[in-house]
Amino acid sequence: MRFPSRSYSGWQRFYNISVDQVINLDGELPKEVVIEDKQAQEQLKLMQELDEEERSMIFKMIDSFLTKKKFKDFFNKNVASL
């Protein structure tokens, strides 16, 4: 048996399925994610106006805070189990 092109469009035509059907084989579409924090939405929009170096600095700060929190949670969980 010879399959059509290796590209997605070839497979889509061959199997008559959409991208959603390939990714979500159970037949359900993923739920839409909605940001309800209007202040966060506005800040994200304003961040796009910054130059690349400033945006990079903000993302590094956020990553630093998230890493610190994850480490603290991990440490507290593992110390509590001792």
Image (cartoon, rainbow, N blue to C red):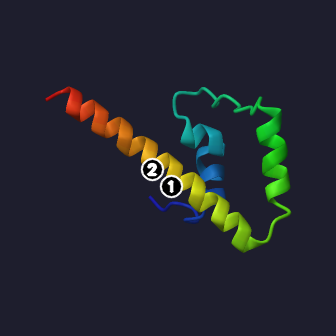
Residue 10 figure quarter: bottom right
Within-10-Å neighbours for mark 1: few <14, some 14–19, many 20+: few
Contact flag, marks 2 and 1 (Cβ < 8 Å): yes
Decide which of 8, 20 is in the foreground and name it: 20
Residue 61 to residue 31: above or below: below
- Relative placement, left or right, of 9 versus 36 is left
- Relative placement, left or right, of 68 versus 34 is left
Three-letter code, disc 2: Thr
**Residue occupied by mark 1:** 64
Q: Residue at x 28, y 31 (%)?
A: 77
Q: How many marks?
A: 2
Kind of element beneath mark 1: helix
Q: Which mark is residue 67?
A: 2
Give the image location of residue 3, x and y in percent: 51, 60
Q: Residue at x 55, y 65 (%)?
A: 6
Residue 49 to residue 36: above or below: below
Residue 72 to residue 14: above or below: above
